Amino acid sequence: MSIRVQSVSKTFGSFRALDNINLDLEPGKLVALLGPSGCGKTTLLRVIAGLEWPDQGRIIIDGRDTDAVHARERQVGFVFQHYALFRHMTVFENIAFGLRVKAKDERPSEADITARVRELLNLVQLDWQADRYPAQLSGGQRQRIALARALAVRPKVLLLDEPFGALDAQVRKELRKWLRQLHDELHITSIFVTHDQDEALEVADQIVLVNQGRVEQVGAVQDVYDHPATAFAYKFLGGANRFEGVINGGHLMVGNTPLKLEGLVPANGTRAEAFARPYQVTIANNITGAESAIPITIQRATIRGNMVRVDATHAQTPQQVYEVELTREQWRGSGQTCGQPAFLLVGSLRAFAIQ
Amino acid sequence: MNLISKTRFEENMATRDPPWVKAIVLTLGLGFFALFLIAPLAAVFIEAFRKGLNLYVSALTEPEARSAIRLTLTAAAIAVPLNVLFGVAAAWAITKFEFRHKQTLITLIDLPFSVSPVIAGLVFVLLFGAQGWFGTILSDHGIKVIFALPGIVLATIFVTVPFIARELIPLMQSQGTEEEQAALVLGASGWQMFWRVTLPNIKWALIYGVILCNARAMGEFGAVSVVSGHVRGLTNTMPLHIEILYNEYQFSASFAVASLLALLALVTLGLKSFVEWRGALRPHHQHAEGHS
């Protein structure tokens, strides 16, 4: 089911958690709400679920305005970071809860409830744990039960609030893959909140990048990674070399080096920044003239598999560090060694004015 | 949990004390208990049976004693359920909602603990007594509060108000509201959420609070003494009855009734330990445990 968020704002006291958010999410996609902690992503998720009310704006789920719809009637599944399993109930009863609290005329028979719970336990591969209590399960198991519980009532959308945040690295990786597979089976429109860019890149179809209560960028995972729309998107997603300077005659002056720019160039005299991913820059001995070249000193080269990561500093201002990613061949071909002066070759970049 | 903390304190070289320290600490502790707790308790029962079983039984079955027992049970039967209601509501309000003056409410709940029971009783006399603020209105409508059952119940409620709320608040604070939110999103009504999620989670703490509250309700002397008026066979509770008997030099009868109250205390202690043991069986803190 589709989810539309229309100019939603929410403040807590003087803190603006959500600032005029607009979103249009297609049905059947697995969407990552990605952003640093405190950026408002969890608040947005809770507003969609009906656990918080927006000060302004509307949430439209499956074409239906949820303005007057209480959380219990929104038919959303919600998975909490700390599982929030009912601690006094067995795993079976936890999953059955949503079915048991239905009004009498909608409530399935006991046999149907049992069948549905069994089906979900199989789905989350924990059918042998039905009679256990949550405290007897591992973190990863608890989160899978929480997911099964949310799915039991056949929600229109599934909302997951940092679902892997409380798990250790190994379990988190497994659960990520598992969630992706599960989504491919069920195709239920899902949004999950994360501050972990790897998680978003690995699991999601679409990324919604959130910063300071605003949507920075929305798009398919690869698009957002390859074509960041804002300086924040560059910095937060993937990491990049940063070049700061002043705009002069269509170039960004970094020290004495003019960098070529593309796209919309800020006005002359503006302080601006531009970004290039480590694999988008190379190293050369001398300037060929065609490209922007920054004088650097090579500090260190680390070999990982077929890739070489080169750490370098600006020749004049050594506190400015750069990262370059080369293949072994490129690194060998460049004939560079550590401690040597060289040039960092940068293609045309997009400059963002610094506010 | 690490292995070190599982070693018994006294068997651990690092924390082991010389034997004489152990002896002194044990003597002090156990001696104190023997002198101040066990001895008086034993004295109550010995004194109660000093003049034989017959007098003991008749002291408990004479009309005034039976009326006192009945009154005590009635007052507790009204006060404890009302305090359950209030205690759960107050704990719920404090732990699940954000509102101004929350701290004031928490402090107010403790008030009966810090005020002398005599003053608590006097307050009700000032409010509802014949010369009190509402005295005229009440007597015009033929309602008697002071020197009657309502006054005794009011005083009992006042004195025992904190027990249940204070038992529940820390537990509910540590449990947070996520389970309730999960229940709501799954479609539960407020009522279903309370009965199926909140109440089972606080069950043992609530029972514990009820036991303590009941023990105090039956044993309360000061506040009840002020509002009761000591009308024999009518407004005397067990503690008041005991005092009157004692003042009239009917020591054995007085101790006989006292032994009944003491027995109640022992039963309460037994129940309390049982509830603590039961409550500890079920792990309550799933978040506090290690993950995965």
Image (cartoon, grey):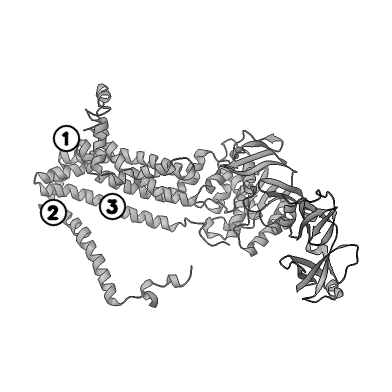
Coordinates of residue A102 in the picture (x, y in percent)? 57, 39
Give the residue number, with chain letter if any, for mark 1.
B231
Instruction: Give the mark nearest the N terminus, 1 or 2.
Output: 2
> Image height check: is A288 above or below A200?
below
Q: Tags 1 and 3 in contact by the CB under 8 Å rule?
A: no
Disc 1 and disc 3: Cα gap in Å?
29 Å
* Apparent side of residue A219 relative to residue B123 in the rendered image (left or right): right
Q: Residue at x 40, y 42 (%)?
A: B104
Residue density around tag 3, few if under 14, some if 14–19, many if 20 or more, within 10 Å: some
Residue extending farthest top: B140
Instruction: Give the mark nearest the N terminus, 1 or 3.
Output: 1
Host chain of mark 2: B
Residue density around tag 1, few if under 14, some if 14–19, many if 20 or more, within 10 Å: few
* Apparent side of residue A43 relative to residue A224 in the rendered image (left or right): left
Disc 3 and disc 2: Cα gap in Å?
20 Å
Coordinates of residue A195 in the picture (x, y in percent)? 66, 55
Give the residue number, with chain letter if any, for mark 2.
B47
